[in-house]
């Protein structure tokens, strides 16, 4: 216990000595000292943060974790979107799809009729040509 107390006292004396020396320095040196200390502190904080972020990113980069997070996140977003849609909006969307299919069906019928007319005309022309050559 005495060693611990002695070590504590020695540390406090060292800090007090550094503070006294700092007070005796010119203002320009104080400014540069604070700037250097702040830069060093910022570098240490940035390095620690980068290591933490790197650890998190490397964990997320694991395919099993990434797929799980993507599935859960995508499911949550999709569920939220479906829930946010009102019943009227969904019904209106279905009506729009049905109207589009009906219009497409009319277009198909028109193409089929035109094709039938063209085939009939071609057949008539062949019959006429065959009749003229006899």
Image (spheres, rainbow, N blue to C red):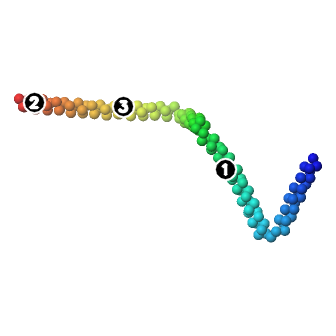
Please name the residue that numbered disc 1 is placed on.
50
Residue drawn where x is 66% and y is 44% of the image: 55
Q: Check disc 3 and report its element: helix, strand or loop.
A: helix
Can see residue 69?
no
**Relative image position of residue 83 (x, y in whole percent):** 56, 33
Within-10-Å neighbours for mark 3: few <14, some 14–19, many 20+: few
Cα distance between the residues tagged 1 and 2: 88 Å
Which residue reaches farthest front? 3
Residue 90 visible from this viewpoint: yes
Distance (Cα) linking label 2 and label 3: 42 Å
Instruction: Please state which of the two labelled residues, at mark 1 or mark 2, is closer to the viewer.
Output: 1
Could you say where residue 84 lies in the image, as x and y percent from the top left?
55, 35
Q: Is residue 120 left or right of residue 97?
A: left
Judging by the rendered image, the residue that carries numbered circle 2 is 130
Residue in the foreground of this view, choosing between 57 and 96: 57
Q: Please, is residue 82 above or below residue 38 in the view?
A: above
The residue mark sitting in front, 3 or 1, is 1
Q: Residues within 10 Å of mark 2 (few under 14, many from 20)?
A: few
Q: Which residue sits furthest left?
A: 134
Circles 3 and 1, Cβ within 8 Å, touching? The answer is: no
The residue that appears at 38% across and 34% down in the rendered structure is 100
Question: Which residue occupies the foreground of this view, 46 or 82?
Answer: 46
Q: Secondary structure at mark 2?
A: helix
Tell me the quadrant of the picture where the C terminus can be found.
top left
Where disc 1 sits, the SS reads helix
Which residue is depicted at the point 62% across and 43% down?
58
Residue 12 position in % (x across, y down) = 88, 56
- Which residue is disc 3 drawn over? 102
Compared across the picture, whether 19 is left or right of 122 comes to: right
């Amino acid at each position: 216990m005495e060693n611990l107390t002695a070590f504590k006292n020695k540390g406090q004396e060292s800090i007090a000595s550094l503070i006294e020396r700092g007070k005796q320095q010119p203002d320009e040196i104080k400014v540069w000292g604070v700037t250097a200390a702040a830069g060093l502190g910022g570098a240490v904080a940035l390095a620690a943060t980068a290591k933490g972020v790197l650890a998190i990113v490397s964990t997320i980069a694991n395919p099993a974790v990434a797929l799980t997070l993507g599935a859960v996140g995508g499911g949550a977003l999709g569920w939220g979107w479906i829930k946010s849609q009102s019943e009227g909006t969904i019904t209106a969307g279905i009506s729009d799809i049905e109207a589009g299919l009906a219009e497409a069906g009319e277009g198909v019928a028109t193409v089929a009729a035109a094709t039938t007319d063209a085939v009939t005309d071609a057949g008539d022309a062949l019959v006429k040509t065959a009749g003229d050559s006899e």
